[in-house]
Amino acid sequence: MLRINDEAPNFTAETSQGVINFHEWIGDGWAILFSHPKDFTPVCTTELGYMAGLEPEFKKRNCKIIGLSVDPASSHSKWAVDIEETQGHKVNYPMIGDPELKVAKLYGMLPADAGDTSEGRTAATNATVRTVFVIGPDKKIKLMLAYPMSTGRNFDEVLRVLDSMQLTAKYQVATPVNWKQGDEVIISTSVSDEEAKKKYPGGWKTLRPYLRIVAQPK
């Protein structure tokens, strides 16, 4: 089972934009891998379209997007037409074809005994292939989310979490509940008051010795 801070398993696969090696494709930035149980499914159609609309925001944050479905990459290209026509956004990011279920099994989305073909499988039998992985420049998993088939994913939340992770990776802070860009942050407990005085000469609010609130670093 994969966990946060595990290295994201590498793979080579056919996509709607040609063959990629996953780690090489990520490069030195961030990446989001989000998976789908089958092409031409209603909820996933809305998700892929919304992510296509959000892609410029992820690009600003040096984060690539890549989708996955257990159907062949050739099917993804046909699905992309429906997505653009119904959702109003063209899918410009690659979509991984996984007809042999290799990537789905590699990432623990399907059990090892799920077989080796997508032929004859339905969205219901692939229901667990609805995950989101956020992967950092170090190729380690920073976030994992799993959703049921009937519930569309909240990709605004994924963008919010990416903002938080990039901020906390740069500064010794954490973000509180429901944090968004520009809100106050928490000084990490690993930072002593003496160190904090150097970092934040303007001071901070101490609610408890372990809970020190300060303006978001710029």
Image (tube, rainbow, N blue to C red):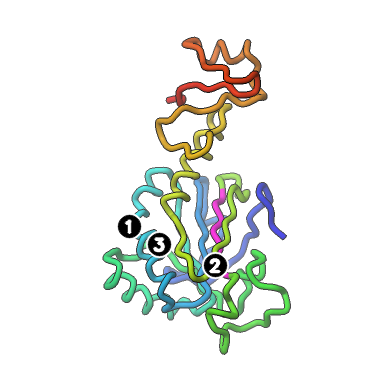
Closer to the chain start, of discs 3 and 1, is: 1
In the image, what residue type sits under mark 1?
Gly
Quarter of the figure that contains the N terminus: bottom right
Q: In the rendered view, does 111 fall on the left or right side of 55?
A: right
Q: Residue furthest front?
A: 207
Q: Magenta stretch?
A: 129-135
Element type where label 2 sits in the image: loop
In the image, what residue type sits under mark 3?
Tyr
Pointers 2 and 3 in contact (CB under 8 A)? Answer: no
Mark 1, residues whose alpha carbon is within 10 Å: few (<14), some, or many (≥20)? Answer: some
**Image location (x, y in percent) of residue 16:** 43, 71
Q: In the rendered view, does 194 fall on the left or right side of 96?
A: right
- Number of marks in picture: 3
State the CA–CA distance, disc 1 to disc 2: 23 Å
Name the residue tied to disc 2.
148
**Image location (x, y in percent) of residue 73:** 46, 76
Quarter of the figure that contains the C terminus: top left
Instruction: Please tell me the numbered disc located at residue 53.
Output: 1
Mark 3, residues whose alpha carbon is within 10 Å: few (<14), some, or many (≥20)? Answer: some
Residue 134 in magenta stretch = yes
Mark 2, residues whose alpha carbon is within 10 Å: few (<14), some, or many (≥20)? Answer: few
Q: Nearer the viewer, residue 97 or 125?
A: 125
Closer to the observer: label 3 or label 1?
1
**Image location (x, y in percent) of residue 14:** 51, 72
Classify residue 208 by image quadrant. top right
Seen at 65% across and 72% down, the residue is 110
Residue 115 in magenta stretch = no
Name the residue tied to disc 3.
93
Q: Tell me: residue 209, above or below residue 146.
A: above
Seen at 46% across and 40% down, the residue is 163
State the CA–CA distance, disc 3 to disc 1: 11 Å
